[in-house]
Image (cartoon, rainbow, N blue to C red):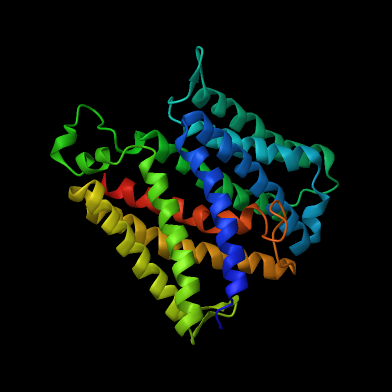
Amino acid sequence: MAFNLQTFRTRAITAVLFAVVMLLGLLWNKWSFLLLFSIIHFGCWFEYQKLVCLIDKGYATINPFHKYGVMIGGYGLMLFFTADWYIAGNVSLHSVGWMLMLAGFLLVPISELLFSKQFHFKNIAHSFFGLVYISLSWALLMHLRSGALWLPHNGEDMFSNISILLAKISGYAVPLIIVGSIWINDTMAYIVGSLIGKTPLSAVSPKKTWEGTIGGIILAVAAMYGLALLCQSSSAWLWATIAFVAAVTGTAGDLLESKLKRLAGVKDSGSFMPGHGGFLDRFDSLLLATTFVWLLLKLIS
């Protein structure tokens, strides 16, 4: 894969603009974080349903209650995982999320029975996959942002185990580490692959190479480890571990979305950034990486 300066320049400019918007949402406050990923959640869902309709024509026949009910239920799941961290007045978004989940998830099967000519389990399965693929991923990211995952439970002394290291990484830092690792991995994989890449990684994404993939992962881990040494040396190994998991699973997430697009016969999942793809194109790596980083921290906390 020859190095294309124009392509790299376009990607770099897009990445800078994209990074500004992302960083504002990630760092301004918890409400900007919620707003950012609320928009991303629904953007990913609209594109996912469009792709599935191209892959399976039968899914295009789902009724509006199913189509939007699963999105609302998924958004309820996302709010549910805020863990009482978001409270407006006397209303907890955690409780609102529970009600939206109940309403949305009941609406889907009921609407299929009442408004569809036939009950298609395959359509339910497509929507369920979307819930796991999209809504659960953003729900777990909200959970990571809240910091609730590593709070001590049942009187546990947080200084007696690894929770002390997790506590040192404040809520906003974990999403930043994940996002930063993915950005570094993607950029370095492209550069390394362009310069020395020869061995194709997968037929699903022929431009990716093993050399670029391995180089991107190594450089992402090294960069995050070095940054951690400057910020929190005692937890540098944890930053590096998160970076490794995010880079590896993020690459897998990229391949998964590429497979969906190939099955649908499209180049991009959408066009919310003209000429640069859609929501799923931009967040495919983060969708999978978030879930696995959450599982990692859940296991060690």
Q: Quadrant of residue 68?
A: top right
Which corner quadrant holds the N terminus?
A: bottom right
* Whether residue 65 is visible: yes
The spot of residue 248 in percent (x, y) is: 41, 65
Residue placed furthest toward the left: 160
Residue located at (63% from left, 39% from top):
39
In front of the other: 184 or 56 = 184
Compared across the picture, whether 164 is left or right of 149 comes to left
The spot of residue 10 in percent (x, y) is: 62, 64
The spot of residue 132 in percent (x, y) is: 55, 49
Residue 228, placed above or below residue 267 = above
Residue placed furthest toward the bottom: 198
Give the total number of marks visible in the rendering: 0
Residue 134, placed above or below residue 101 = below
Q: Quadrant of residue 281?
A: bottom right
Residue located at (50% from left, 54% from top):
286
Which corner quadrant holds the C terminus?
A: top left
Residue 31, placed above or below residue 7 = above
Compared across the picture, whether 186 is left or right of 52 comes to left
Residue located at (58% from left, 74% from top):
5
In front of the other: 219 or 281 = 219
Residue located at (75% from left, 52% from top):
120
Compared across the picture, whether 168 is left or right of 88 comes to left
Residue placed furthest toward the top: 90
* Whether residue 291 is visible: no
In front of the other: 97 or 169 = 169
In front of the other: 198 or 14 = 14
The spot of residue 240 in percent (x, y) is: 29, 58
Q: Quadrant of residue 203?
A: bottom right
Residue placed furthest toward the right: 117
